[in-house]
Image (spheres, rainbow, N blue to C red):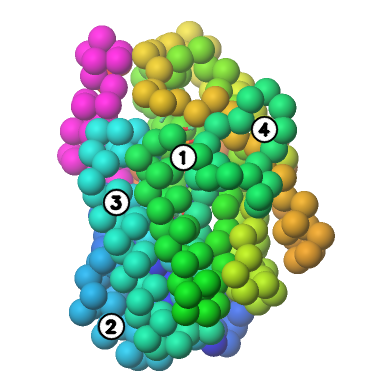
Amino acid sequence: MKLLVTGGAGFIGSNFVLYMLREHPNYEIINVDALTYAGNLENLQSIESNSRHTFIKADIADVKQMENIFAQGIDVVVNFAAESHVDRSILAPDIFVRTNVMGTQVLLEAAKKYQITKFVQVSTDEVYGSLGPTGLFTEETPLMPNSPYSASKAGSDLLVRAYHETFSLPVNITRCSNNYGPFQFPEKLIPLIISRALNDEAIPVYGDGLNIRDWLYVEDHCRAIDLVIHQGKSGDVYNIGGNNERTNIHIVETVLQQLGKPLSLIRYVKDRLGHDRRYGIDPTKLETELGWKPAHNFETGIKETITWYLNHQEWMERVQSGTYQDYVKLQYGQRMGDSGA
Ligand code: NAD
Ligand code: TYD
């Protein structure tokens, strides 16, 4: 099988490429990534000389580039490529619409023209909006995105659905909860806490710290996508989550304790605009129809993750380049009184 993976130099995409090459010794992967600030070829260092993996630096919104790639013959597309950070979408929404909505449409059009056998759109639970204290997101929950990021992901989901309904393109949409694990860019909560705590810097906690996310170890997400590629019913949506809801403050305290750092590093800061209160996934469909079960719970997953970051401090230093420092100033400068950032 020849797989086109987009965004395969990012956090989940690179974990997925490594996972698929390991699990399927006869698969070939074409990995297309524009290498934005979030894409890092260093994540793929261990497969540099693997002849079953080809990396192409390209933009999914570029019609010509995508046509050339699809013309090589592709069986399955897994679309991870996206602008993925909510806080950045609040500062600059336009790039989210370009990459997430327009880029997905370019891929869908090429997939239709070249008659691929499956298009998997890697989406997010954030398209469902925010939950109250009870209840879970099912595949039937209406889409009610609240941030420019989640709105752009919902837009791409609807295009994927439309290509299935109108052109009978074989598709699946997966909607996963928050991921954590190796190679996550340190703008997202867990690696941000680890990185700042190791430097004895203040940890910014938005609002009252009681917002809830449902955390899944990245390899469990990769395994779910693998199952969906092979067994997903065409046109269907699959929610992915491991029933690991935690408040943000619990996450911060857990990581600080495991690193042996003082809780006095915690700094409550101004809340994120439009901050969703709670996400929680009902994974029953994936479990009963495709037989998926997560291998990690939060306690084992977070330990492995912290160990990985402790062993890869140089990786962390290198991805935190000059451009990233500019973002940190913009994002946290005022919130932290221009001190801790
Ligand atoms: P990431 O930001 O780490 O990686 C995104 C990758 O896409 C980067 O390598 C980047 O260079 C690439 N990219 C961006 N614009 C591109 C373009 N125009 N053309 C080609 N490549 C481009 O994101 P991630 O956390 O790995 O998320 C991957 C996907 O999974 C996203 O679609 C995201 O919405 C979805 N998702 C993420 C989470 C999570 O917790 N991180 C949860 C559920 C779903
Ligand atoms: P994040 O990792 O950005 O993922 P998402 O917004 O997609 O869920 O944030 C996870 C939670 O942590 C979210 O409720 C916002 C919060 N948060 C902080 O409190 N401080 C921070 O510095 C960051 C980046 C996030």
Q: Split into 4 quadrants, where in the image is the C terminus?
A: top left
Total marks shown come to 4
Q: In which quarter of the image is residue 174?
A: bottom right
- Label 3 sits on residue: 97
Label 4 to label 1, Cα distance in Å? 20 Å
Which amino acid is tagged 2? Glu
Which amino acid is tagged 1? Pro
User: Tag 1, which secondary structure?
Assistant: loop
- Label 2 sits on residue: 67
Q: Which mark is residue 242?
A: none
* Circle nearer the viewer, 3 or 2: 3
**Mark 4 crowd level (few <14, some 14–19, many ≥20, 10 Å Cα):** many
Place of residue 245 in the rendered image (x, y in percent of width and height, measured from the top left): 67, 32
Label 1 to label 2, Cα distance in Å? 31 Å
Q: Does the magenta stretch include residue 2?
A: no
Label 1 to label 3, Cα distance in Å? 14 Å
Q: Which mark is residue 245?
A: 4
Closer to the chain start, of discs 1 and 2, is 2
User: Tag 3, which secondary structure?
Assistant: helix
- Identified at 23% across, 46% down, the residue is 94
Which amino acid is tagged 3? Val
- Label 1 sits on residue: 145
